[in-house]
Each structure stands twice: as C-alpha cells, then as structure tokens.
Amino acid sequence: MDRTPAVDAELARLLSIADARDVAASDAETSASGADGDGALYLREVANRARAAHDAVRALVESAPSSSSKPRGPLAIPRVRCETLSLARFRRDFVIPQRPVIIVGLGPHLTSDGANASDLRWLRKHGASKKVAVSVDNAHVASTLSCGGVEIVNLGDHLDVVSALDEDPPVNERDARFGKRRGDGSYLYDCAIPLKLPSLSHGVRVPRYFAHDFLQRTRMTHAFSASWPSLFVAAPHTRSSLHVDQWKGNFWMAMVKGTKRWTLFHREDIPFLSPDYGRGTLDPGFPSLVELDASRVSAANAATTTTRRGDGIGDSQKLDADAAASSARETETTHETPASHPFLEYARRWDCDLGPGEVLFVPGGWPHHVHNLCVTVSFAGNFVDEVRSIHWSPYDRVGVVNASNLDDALFDMKLLGNKYGPQMMATHDALDEVWFDPEDETLVEETLEAKQLVVRVEDYRGGVASRWGKDDWDGATSDDDDDDDDGGGGGGGDGG
Ligand SMILES: O=C(O)CCC(=O)C(=O)O
C-alpha cells in the first residue's frame, strides 16, 4: 500500500490515541483502591482496543495489499422468506456465523392490524395518548441525550407532526423548505415499549426468531428486562450516527411503515473506519457516514462514478453509487471539506433499503448507520444468545464451540459494571448466573407458517415462547388485541 500522507496521518492518529489511552489506563491502575476500582479494568480494555485498532491498520499497510484485497463494493444482504426459514436454521445459518439477513413475509403479522399495519391504527389505538420523549433537531445522534434536545409530547401528536412531512412529491434534503418545517429532525428513538408504552404491547408482535433471547430468560430482573421491543417513529431524513450497540448486542428491527437505508460494516473491520477511541469508551466513535462516503467520492474519479451508474451495475452497487453521490451533495451543502479516510475501502460493507414488513438481523458488534428515507415506523430489540456446538478436534478429541455473543456480552457488561456501577453489574450478574444448557434450547427445525413466526410481547417477555415447539403456537388471534389497554394480553394460542 502506498504510504501517502493520508495513510501516515491516520496511522499516527491511531498511535497517539493508543498511547494516550495507555497513559489513562496506567493512571487509573495506579490510583485504584482495589483491582476493580475506579474503572481501571474498563480503561485498560479501552486501551487494548485502541492499540489493536492501530496494530490492525499497521499490519494492513505492511502487508502491502493489492487492489484485489479490497472488498468489491457494498455487499447485498440476503432476503429470505420466513416460510422457508426455520427457527433453527436462522440461528445456524445467520446468528452463529454472524451474517446479516432480511427476513421477509412477516409483514401482515407484525401488528394487531394484519395487512393494514402501515395505516398505524394499532399505534394510535394503543399509544396515541401516551407521553413520550421525542428528540428534536437530530439530538438523538449525540451520544448523551441532554434535556435541551428532547420534547415531551403525546405520541399521537408526534405521529401527526411527522406524518405531515410525508409530502407528495417528497421534499428532499436540498429543498429550501427542508429543515424549516415543523417536525423536521424529530425522532422518537428506541422508546422501550414494555417500560414506557406498556399498552402498546397489545399492538406489536415480536418475530419468533428472537424469542430465545437470553436477556428475557434470567431469574433476576436487570437493566434491560423491559427495554425491548422498542419503538422508532422518525421524520424523513433523520439518521442514526454510525455506531456499535453496547455489549456486542445482536440487533433486530421490524419495519412497519416507510423505508430505512441501512449500512452495516463487519465488526472485524472497525479499525478501517477511522475509529475514535479517544473518547474513552469500549466502543469507539466514528466519523459520520456522510463524511466517510464523501471522502470516498472525493478520492474516486468522477468519470468512473458516472460510468458505473449507467452501466448495468448490481442493486447494491447502484445503492452505493446513489448514497455516495447523495453524501457528496450533503457535504457540498454543509461546506465540509472531505476528510481523508484512507482505509475505508478495506472495510467490508453491506447496504440495504429496509421496507415495510421486512425484518433485519444485525450481528453483535457490527457498526451500523441508518437513514430514514421518509416517515418511518419500526420496532426493534437487542438480544443475547449462544449456541454451543460439539465439534471434533483431533487434538482435544472433542471441543465445545461457543458461537454468538453471550461471552462477549458478559465480558463488556462486567467492564461496564466496573465503570458505571451496581445497576450495570446487576445485568451482568443476572445473565451470568444462569446456565443456558444447550439441552434446554428448543431448536425448531420444521418450517412454520408466517402467523406462527411472531409472538405476543407477553410471551416474548420472560422467555415463554423460547420453549415452544413446532405445534405449541398457532399465531395470535384477534382476541389478543383486546381493549383492556393496561391489562394482560388476550387468549389465543396454546403455547406452553
Ligand atoms: O433505526 C435507527 O435509526 C437506528 C436503530 C439502531 O441502530 C439501534 O437502535 O441501534
């Protein structure tokens, strides 16, 4: 690889952050009262990760990569129909190997409104009068929400305000009106349904692919017992920052209305995304995707981009070209000078437009970014699991392979507990005390009908649905959508 000034500058930046994190960790170790005092273990791990990022980039530079070792543009996330994807195969083919996937076909079952979910009657009926904290002026992209960036409003009012922004034809980000309309930049972001909107639990169904979540199956309650599913109601062109979910949480999102443009990067390629460990957190900050893409566009020659766009390229490449062009425009309008991110093109990247009725799985620890292309309504959750598979090793004669994110989650939660105190440590302890015996895992191998592949929130919580076999659940009935908004769910199904 050519040692351009940009390459050297990025290497130097990563090295100086790694050195600074080492000093911070050593200081904390020296002043710590006990081995776990003052978050010293946490800071040492931040320093390790900062050093590893520098070393990975240096190794890339020293390996003199050829252009053929660069990933060939954004990859496509496979779409798989739910009727062909058994619960067991989902875990085996996607969760264990940590591969993203879009599950299609669940749309008419994701809410109590059947095929009419995107009319949002379920949301108005069960949630319109509830108060929610809506972030305004894109405040949700800040790592810490301050009161200044939040408005407490009725969910129904927020819905009215953002719905009015879905104009025909749509107002794009370069339009002089954009940013000045009431509601531009407002986002109900990750609002915990069981905790903050319990009545809405009657309106949504959790895809059964995630019902085995270990966080729902602990004996003790913990900080995340009532966090998911969570609700997102977004104004057009709001975005999430490029970020990694805490403690390597696996993530899923079910789209009900509108389309979100998702960008994912492979977890192992974090060092190539100009990560910032200088902020002292286990997961680094990143430049915005707009900035990253703009640097790519400025590095590429314009003629190539023009040829690619008209030249029979694949969907994901088209999406990429469009995203890059739109990022370039955004950079233009914000007068940013494109910064240089010389290793970006070595990061494996996946792009997709996630539309109504689709469900996305994002592997734990993967950096991701979201752009709401229009008004969107979705719900989502993080989850933890593990599958131990017995695998023959000639050396050990037999070995146990742990896959997915339980060990990673426990590792990070312990460090977070070390830094942030008892509540976070209680989450670690709640997860750690349970022995999730592989023998207790219900792996349903049979394919099921779409209606059997979603569960009521009440059956997701506490892990009830994780124990169901193929014949234990026939889908929710219309009785489940009862009028008793604050009581339990209705009957339906005979799971147990
Ligand atoms: O839909 C969004 O805006 C982002 C969701 C997300 O990335 C998350 O909750 O981690």
Image (tube, grey):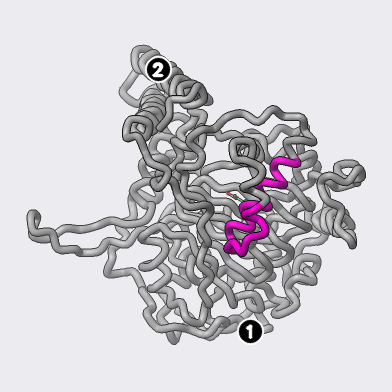
For residue 52, above or below residue 129: above
For residue 411, above or below residue 49: below
Q: Earlier in the sequence, mark 2 or mark 1?
A: 2
Q: Position of residue 308 (x, y in %)?
A: 62, 54
Front-lying residue, 355 or 137: 355
Secondary element at image label 2 = helix
Q: Which image quadrant: the N terminus?
A: top left
Q: In the figure, residue 88 lies in which quadrant?
A: bottom left
Secondary element at image label 1 = loop
Magenta stretch: dominant secondary structure: helix
Residue 84 visible, this orientation = yes
For residue 204, above or below residue 288: below
Three-letter amino acid code of the residue under disc 1:
Thr
Q: Residues within 10 Å of mark 1 (few under 14, many from 20)?
A: few
Q: Which mark is residue 145?
A: none
Front-lying residue, 363 or 80: 80
Q: Left or right: 401 with respect to 299?
A: left
- Residue wearing tag 1: 477
Q: Position of residue 218 (x, y in %)?
A: 41, 56
Is residue 319 highlighted in magenta?
Answer: yes
Q: Which image quadrant: the C terminus?
A: bottom left
Three-letter amino acid code of the residue under disc 2:
Asp
Magenta segment? 307-329
Q: Position of residue 17 (x, y in %)?
A: 46, 21
Q: Position of residue 20 (x, y in %)?
A: 44, 16
Please tell me which residue is depicted at 81% across the width and 46% down the height of the picture.
Answer: 173
Please tell me which residue is depicted at 61% across the width and 64% down the height of the picture.
Answer: 312
- Residue wearing tag 2: 19
